[in-house]
């Protein structure tokens, strides 16, 4: 979906999103900071479901025919979820138009780029921040002098020197897509599985200009905001101002479930930092407005220390308990399987601890060795074996066999279908009875895999049949109780 322009652009900003509902914040930052080149620049977003050959044809058509003396540039945002498709797209573009200047940026090409096929195909790579470095490179490519270096370290300017990107969201974006926003960049924590471990600290945008931009988005009709800040509640003063901003835009009259507010805001929280001032504001939001993503990752203190993760266990449990019982926020919590030294038994204990608090969702993720992350330092000591292809998921460790990892992969898929889908909340209570909810669900997962041989393509109706058969079988024999739980 290329941007319609009266004059053919000289520069295209392109990425392949995982789904249409996602709108690239990074590309809009680049577009907003193009300066005098803004009028010659177009934004092109696609999804990974599109054929690279079709995308190459669309991009070349948008640029128009190659002309002597006219430089054409395409900048690509490259991520773990799109690197394979983007590599094929870059290959097709270079074959069709060798003189086209292709520039890469994004986390996937910012580290360990020496051996990447996509880097070999491209003309330039900007590592790290690209907000001002990409416009500078485009000026050099269009007007000279042409840079001699292929890999260019991105310049990190003060945040108040950046043009904010929110005016670049189109009316279609506002109507149909989740809008990504950020009140800060970076992260002061050093969790080794995360690229933010490479940041020196977190940097906050000036609050008044940011809130003014949020208000303009709201006035234009935006109602779905997803904050990408790694540590939204790191600075309580700024967090409180932002929460109050959204509270002020809710109806004053009491709401009924039939009149749910037309507003949705997603934040990522640090689990062990929730001062009373933020609690007081959070408690005022009605259901359906706030969603908190809370990365627990592991409750094992030895694993936490090994991966440089600072997390106060007691405060984390207390804050999660408060959010469940005293707020209407939807809680999306995360655990990571396969961290160095984490056994199946210790992960099960962590899952059971988290499940006992009853968050709305528990996302079960498999460790991935993102390029550049410090988790690589544990590879030899803990026998970490990763897939060589994206998303570089762990295959086995010194304390987890390949079979155990595959069992978990199946369990995580079934957990999404049965628990996180919200379709089987009453049945789930039956399914997870026993001393260990994790062990109970693992038994169901093993049974379902042996029974169906499927982790995808299972319809809700099929799951109902499988659940009924399992709960009514010798494995979980409570058929009368099951019948009593089902609606008449």
Image (spheres, rainbow, N blue to C red):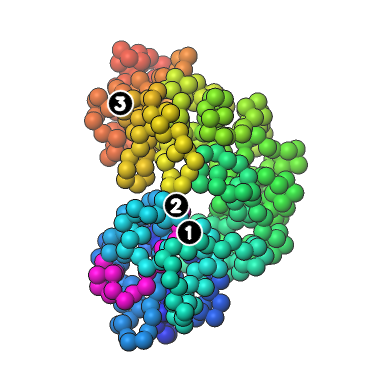
Q: Was residue 101 drawn as part of the magenta stretch in this picture?
A: yes
Q: In the shown orientation, is residue 104 left or right of residue 87?
A: right
Question: For the residues carrying marks 2 and 3, which lies nearer the camera in this image?
Answer: 2
**Span highlighted in magenta in the image:** 92-108
Left/right placement of residue 453 relative to residue 319 reads left
Q: Is residue 208 left or right of residue 192?
A: right
Residue plotted at (60% across, 54% down): 185
The residue where tag 3 is placed is: 403
Q: Residue furthest bottom?
A: 68
Q: Quickly name the residue at label 1.
A: 127
Q: Is residue 260 above or below residue 437?
A: below
Q: Position of residue 387 (x, y in %)?
A: 33, 40
Visible in this render: residue 430? no
Determine the residue located farthest toward the front in the rendered image: 148
Q: Quadrant of residue 215?
A: bottom right
Position of 334 relative to 140 (above/below): above
Q: Measuring 44% from the left and 62% from the top, which residue is drawn there?
A: 151
- Image quadrant occupied by the C terminus: top left
State the residue position of label 2: 111
Badge 3 crowding class, 10 Å Cα cut-off, few under 14, some 14 to 19, many 20 or more, is few
Q: Residue at x 49, y 41 (%)?
A: 374
Q: Residues within 10 Å of mark 1 (few under 14, many from 20)?
A: many
Residue 15, x across and y down, in percent: 40, 62
Instruction: Name which quarter of the figure residue 449 lies in.
Output: top left
Report the number of discs: 3
Q: CA distance from mark 2 to mark 1?
A: 7 Å
Pick whichever of labels 2 and 3 is earlier in the sequence: 2
């Amino acid at each position: 979906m290329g941007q319609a322009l009266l004059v053919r652009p000289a520069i295209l900003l392109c990425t392949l999103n995982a789904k249409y509902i996602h709108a690239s914040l990074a590309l809009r930052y680049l577009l907003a900071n193009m300066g005098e080149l803004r009028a010659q620049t177009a934004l092109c977003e696609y999804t990974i479901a599109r054929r690279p050959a079709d995308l190459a044809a669309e991009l070349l058509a948008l640029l128009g025919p190659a002309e002597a003396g006219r430089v054409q540039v395409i900048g690509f945002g490259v991520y773990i979820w799109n690197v394979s498709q983007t590599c094929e797209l870059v290959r097709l573009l270079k074959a069709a138009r060798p003189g086209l200047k292709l520039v890469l940026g994004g986390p996937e090409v910012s580290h360990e780029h020496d051996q990447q096929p996509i880097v070999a195909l491209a003309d330039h790579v900007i590592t790290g921040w690209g907000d001002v470095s990409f416009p500078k490179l485009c000026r050099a490519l269009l007007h000279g002098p042409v840079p001699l270096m292929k890999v260019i370290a991105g310049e990190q300017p003060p945040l108040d020197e950046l043009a904010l990107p929110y005016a670049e969201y189109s009316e279609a974006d506002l109507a149909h897509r989740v809008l990504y926003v950020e009140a800060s960049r970076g992260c002061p924590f050093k969790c080794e599985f995360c690229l933010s471990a490479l940041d020196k600290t977190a940097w906050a945008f000036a609050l008044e200009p940011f809130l003014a931009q949020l208000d303009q988005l709201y006035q234009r009709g935006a109602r779905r905001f997803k904050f990408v800040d790694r540590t939204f509640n790191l600075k309580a003063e700024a967090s409180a101002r932002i929460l109050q901003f959204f509270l002020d835009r809710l109806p004053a009259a009491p709401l009924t479930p039939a009149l749910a507010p037309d507003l949705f805001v997603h934040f990522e929280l640090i689990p062990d930092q929730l001062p009373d001032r933020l609690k007081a504001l959070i408690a005022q939001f009605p259901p359906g407005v706030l969603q908190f993503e809370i990365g627990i990752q592991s409750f094992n203190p030895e694993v936490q220390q090994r991966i440089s993760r600072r997390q106060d266990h007691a405060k984390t449990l207390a804050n999660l308990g408060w959010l469940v019982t005293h707020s209407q926020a939807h809680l999306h919590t995360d655990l990571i399987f396969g961290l160095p030294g984490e056994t199946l038994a210790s992960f099960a204990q962590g899952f059971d601890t988290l499940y006992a608090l009853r968050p709305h969702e528990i996302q079960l993720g498999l460790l991935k060795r993102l390029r550049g992350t410090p988790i690589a330092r544990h590879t030899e000591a803990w026998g970490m074996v990763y897939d060589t292809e994206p998303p570089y998921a762990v295959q086995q460790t010194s304390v987890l066999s390949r079979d155990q990892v595959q069992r978990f992969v199946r369990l995580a898929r079934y957990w999404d279908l049965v628990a996180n889908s919200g379709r089987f909340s009453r049945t789930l209570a039956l399914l997870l009875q026993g001393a260990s909810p994790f062990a109970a669900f693992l038994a169901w997962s093993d049974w379902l895999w042996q029974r169906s041989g499927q982790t995808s393509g299972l319809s809700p109706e099929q799951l109902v049949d499988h659940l009924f058969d399992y709960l009514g079988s010798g494995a979980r024999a409570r058929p009368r109780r099951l019948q009593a739980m089902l609606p008449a």
